[in-house]
Image: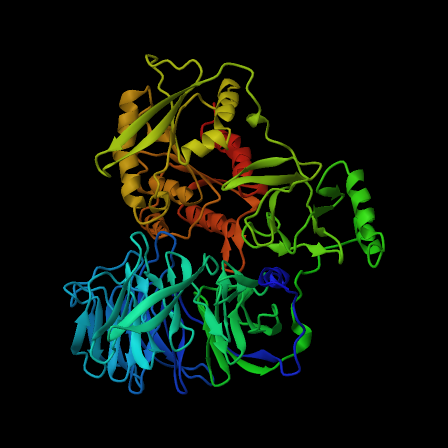
Amino acid sequence: MSIHMLLAALLLAPISRPADDAIGLEPVWSHALGSAYSRVAADDELVVTQYGDGENDYVVAFAPGDGSVLWKCRVDDVYRGHDGSSDGGISTPVIGSKLVFAIGARGKLLALDRRTGEPRWSKHLVNDLGAEEPEYGFTSTPVLEGDVLVVQAGGSDGKNLCGFDANTGELRWSLSDGDAGYASPVVLELLGKRQLVVMNGGELLGVDPSDGELLWRHALGERENASMGRPGAIDDARFFAKISGQLTIFELAEADGGFALNELVRSREFNSTYSVPVYFEGYLYGFTSTFLTCVDVETGRRVWKSRPPGGHGLTLVDDRLVVFGAEGNIVVVRATPDGYAEEGRCAAFEHSGYSWPTVRDGRVFVRNETDIASLALVRADTSSVASTASDAAVGEHAFGAFVASLANAPDASARIAAFVDEQESFPLVDGEFVHFVYVGEAEDVAIVGSMTGGRAAESLARVPGTNFFHRTYRLEPGARWEYGFQVDFGRPGVDPRNPRTVPGRRGPSSDVAAPDYAAAKHLAEPTGARGTLVELEYTSEQLGNTRALSVYLPAGYDATASARYPLVLVHDGPEWLEKGLMRNTLDNVMTGHSVKPSVVVFIAPLDEWWFEAGGSRTEEYVRMLATELVPFLSETYAVSDRASDHVVAGLRGFGLTSALAVATYPDVFGAAAIQSVSLEDVARHALFARLQAAPPKDVKFFVGWNRYEMRDPDLGLDLREHSERLVAALEGAGCKVVKSEANGSHGWAGWRAQSGEWLSALLHAW
């Protein structure tokens, strides 16, 4: 068999049954902690990590045996997560024989007495070394080598990499320019020499940790970057590092009395993850997105890929992988190129995180963003091993009987072909059930969509010996779902047998609805007079940027009329016009006299839209809307000057922005339309503070969401819960709130189905 045939055969090897010496897990202790990305460090006497309590960030130490808190030390004011990140420390502490070392996200480096947690010395990477705080805070984990503490500080004047006296904090050596980035140095034994391998932006460095001597320098390509993650060892000459998102294997060789670094292999595997792979006996094991993946280090080619156990991080213990899997499970898997071989699993938390486990003396210590737990490695209970595809929901229906009849049937493929030809449409809606079917050459097929929360994927069951995949769900009366098929771990795509599609955020999605689902009439092609659309650009002096605007003027718009028009600002403007069919809606509801004729301004987002969609520039952006854009529009069009006639509307993060606009400037905006709000980002703090300190008066909010909202139980995300939390905060502040849950799905088809409702609620023609 050729190597290509072998790789193809192993591409998706089935799950192996556990061996007699299989390892499992048992829970020992757990604690609610506080937000942070910091991993857990552990030795015989201490378990240490960082966390934030909403006001301060701390380093905390637990007893390994029972999890009792030994001490905690304040690091700094809490580091606020922003623009997609969560609160708290990011760097992982390091435990020494006398001291514990930790770097706070704001740049404070602390050396703490390991018995008491009392500070013994400290440095500040910004104030003392001239470092520039990375956009998402200081991330790098220090390295303790003998009595030298090495920190990738990002300092100026040659202080990017610093070696401190571990006992006193005295700076022993420093070298290199650059910034700290989000990488951590590691000590590797290469060619008989212990050396730091440093990812330094556009280069890799080899450094003697004792005195800072530069052993070698390797420049990367002009547009290449090594600023995230950390290198890892393969053998005494080879190591790996992630270069511009690609896993790259290097070999160090002696050359001209020194060292030279040669690139051997690159792999596109292990992307879309913060996790660092591990090496064992010729293969690397790690995550590609949330798929556990095995790669041959000689070729960089994938050997196998597995949907279970999901998750984001792993560590190697002897010949086992200890994985922080999906849904808060810790999973033990054999490190073998023969395929995914799970031995045991145990739930540690309700949901997972981006960390990976630390294993010490038969104990596993792990944390997600808010909790910490300890588990014991024990002899496995092999009955708990997961299967490649969970059983589909089934019931007393003809489809289930058909699938059951295929078991061991000699003509199964022919019967499947005949069955498919007989169907009028797919998926098959059968009373309370909907049966999803995929027929085609594939090794793995999963479904992702409304039924899974829009992020997680669930495997379709395969009829053995055929290319027939299926899964059944219960579809509630009046419901509408969106979904896609993920074939062989690729990007989700539409159901090839379902002609019904709706616009998705990253391409079309397939659509299925219960027979009694009521489509929104306001989306139909208008039959009467239509409004006009004017395109223009607006440059903000405050923000120093320019954005495109599309201004809808209702049918019969009269710039000279004494009655002025209400003003509506709509974020994600181009998508509302294209995917949201908003012109149809406006023409139908305004000419139908259910909504006051209004000037509606569709605002195009900037390329880095997330900063203004609840992110770190939201307050500046909201100020621009209130003090620049609205006055400009009032001068340009026949717009009412009453705040009660001004509405601002947004989805997800821009829903948070819209709520903040009304809460901050109730004298400018009298109402907000908010759909599928996301309260993940930093602007939520400003919003809730304003609602508590100075609740806006005489304003109105429409808060709408779908029953099948975006959710990710693996990471504890649920936008339905976010919407309900926002409603509670607004009502608690005494605001008028119209709340609406639709029986649809997160996405443009669901949002546009509600657009007529929020327009009517906020701009009703009395």
Question: Which residue is outermost to the left?
Answer: 157
Q: Is residue 89 visible?
A: no
x, y percent for residue 591: 50, 18
The image shows residue 324 at horizontal and vertical percentages of: 51, 69
Residue 175 image position (x, y, % from top left): 19, 69
Of residues 658 and 9, the one nearer the viewer is 9
- Check the image and name the residue furthest to the front: 256
Count of numbered tags? 0
Q: In the figure, residue 256 lies in which quadrant?
A: bottom left
Give the side of residue 645 with respect to residue 496, left or right: left
Q: How is the image coloured?
A: rainbow
Quadrant in the rendering for residue 544: top left
Query: Toward the viewer: 169 or 53?
Result: 169
Does residue 126 appear in this view? yes
Q: Quadrant of the N terminus?
A: bottom right
| Whether residue 705 is situated above or below residue 637 in the rendered picture | below
